[in-house]
Amino acid sequence: MLIKTYGSAVQGVNAYTITVEVSVSAGTKYFLVGLPDNAVKEGEQRIEAALKHYNYKMPRQKVVINLAPADIRKEGSSYDLTIAMGILAASGQIAPDKVAQYMIMGELSLDGELRPIKGVLPIAIQARKEGFKGFILPVQNANEAAIVNNLDIIPVRTIQEAIEFMDNRLEIDPMVVNTREMFQNQADQYAADFADVQGQENIKRALEIAAAGGHNLIMIGPPGAGKTMLAKRLPSILPPLSMHEALETTKIHSVAGKLGEASSLLTTRPYRSPHHTISDVALVGGGGVPQPGEISLSHNGVLFLDELPEFKRTVLEVMRQPLEERRVTISRAKTTIDFPANFMLVASMNPCPCGFYNHPEKDCVCGPGVVQRYLNKVSGPLLDRIDLHVEVTPVTFDEMTATRKSEDSTTVRERVVKARVVQQDRFKDFPQIHSNAMMPSQMVKDICNINDAGRALLKTAMERLGLSARAYDRILKVSRTIADLADSPEIKIEHLAEAIQYRSLDREGWAA
């Protein structure tokens, strides 16, 4: 008897359906074909032990299982349940009527319990697209899959529950999640708030500009000045995630297996802060089975690189293209995978190895040339791609002990959202552009018009600081964002002057 069951494979952030054909006929051997990897092959032992635990039998006949399409490599242990249900139906141990109506996925343990799998959200989206009635999966993944409506999500704890459901001996109510209500209830619940930060008004202003225009930012200053504290609070002033952005971000975290059992939809912007010992592949993605890296996990959120010069040079250089393209392409011999990577880069660094170069009170003990060598660890082309360079000075005792409350994140976010609304209206005919930072060069010329006084100021700054053409574009983009925050239709000279002062590392004394 030939039976077809359906599973799914994830490639990049999208899923495609795998048809599991099971044929039981006269003979004695077990054949698994269709380019399975070792994890899929080893499933035979798990399936046999799980069936035996519930008094079902592995057929002692010729069992041929084909995973179609047969020319694509199948990886992982999530096909165990798909294959097991096919074997039971083909050998007449369960009714075959319902098995083809459902997407079936799950890893089996030896006692028949189901373990959670990765990439459930893109699989559920694909199952609905292809018209499946429902999706049978481990109970631990049910919340995540239930985000997808118009698809029956059937959570099962053991293979016995799946068998009884297929045989109509057990009714399992589909998992239902009111996605919109949950999204509204949990949106923007950040633990950190700008009100916690005393002083540092100039840095808060820079972060507000960065959030309003989606600009990259680097903070340079001595240890203990509050760089990390400020960076952690940046997501709390970014505009709230839209439903589309939340689904897109959740898909990436689902593929990477980063969603917890209780989690379903990500409702806050991601904040990733990898350690400086990270490898190239871990940052941008890749590996034998291409997985999203940190830059994709921070899609629609913030990637914070603390102690930037301590990162390996090669790690930083591989970020240059994704910063421009806002996606990363991973190429293999047989396939090319695109992962989205539209993130805000926030970096911090000490000005020198001892940390006290340019400190108002403490003396730097670094020798001649040491400061320059330290700063040169971060390449010019990477710094060029960072719009705002901000010097962070230590907070004074008076500022630390002041009783005056700082502005909270909600107040700052209102101004940021208002500026973003202006940008949405500006770019309404360009669906790929969402903020000023994403403008291509030609659009910068059309939109960021400056008067003669502004042109003269920018010319002087370009000549004195030796700025590149890219830095020129970035200054114009930042000044456009400052004008949006000020609700000004045109870029005034004070907006341009403020944007120029956010190029600290281009100044003599830092990068000279």
Image: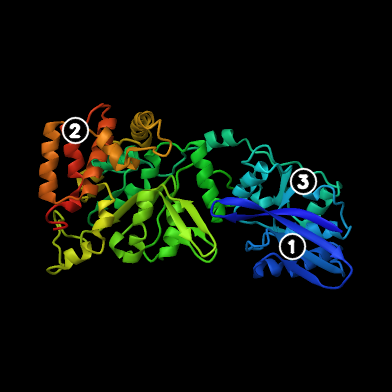
* Element under disc 2: loop
Label 2 or label 1, whichever comes before in sequence order:
1
Q: Tell me the quadrant of the picture where the N terminus can be found.
A: bottom right
Q: Residues within 10 Å of mark 3 (few under 14, many from 20)?
A: some
Expressed as whole percent of the image width and height from the top left, the position of residue 460 reads 10, 43
Residue 472 shows in the view: yes
Nearer to us in this view, 392 or 32: 32
Expressed as whole percent of the image width and height from the top left, the position of residue 289 reads 55, 63
Residue 223 shows in the view: no
Task: Report how far apart the C-alphas of labels 2 and 3 lie in the structure.
Answer: 62 Å
Q: Name the residue located 66 percent from the left edge and 63 percent from the top edge.
A: 77
Label 2 or label 3, whichever comes before in sequence order:
3
Q: Residues within 10 Å of mark 1 (few under 14, many from 20)?
A: many
Amino acid at the residue labelled 3: Gln
Q: Quadrant of residue 499?
A: top left
Q: Which residue is mark 2?
A: 450
Amino acid at the residue labelled 2: Ile
Question: Tag on residue 101?
Answer: 3
Q: Residues within 10 Å of mark 2 (few under 14, many from 20)?
A: some
Residue 278 vertical placement versus 153 (above, below): below
* Element under disc 1: strand
Label 3 or label 1, whichever comes before in sequence order:
1
The colour scheme is: rainbow
Q: Between tags 3 and 1, which lies in front?
A: 1
Judge from the rendering whether residue 478 lies leftward or rightward of residue 367; answer left or right: right
Amino acid at the residue labelled 1: Asn
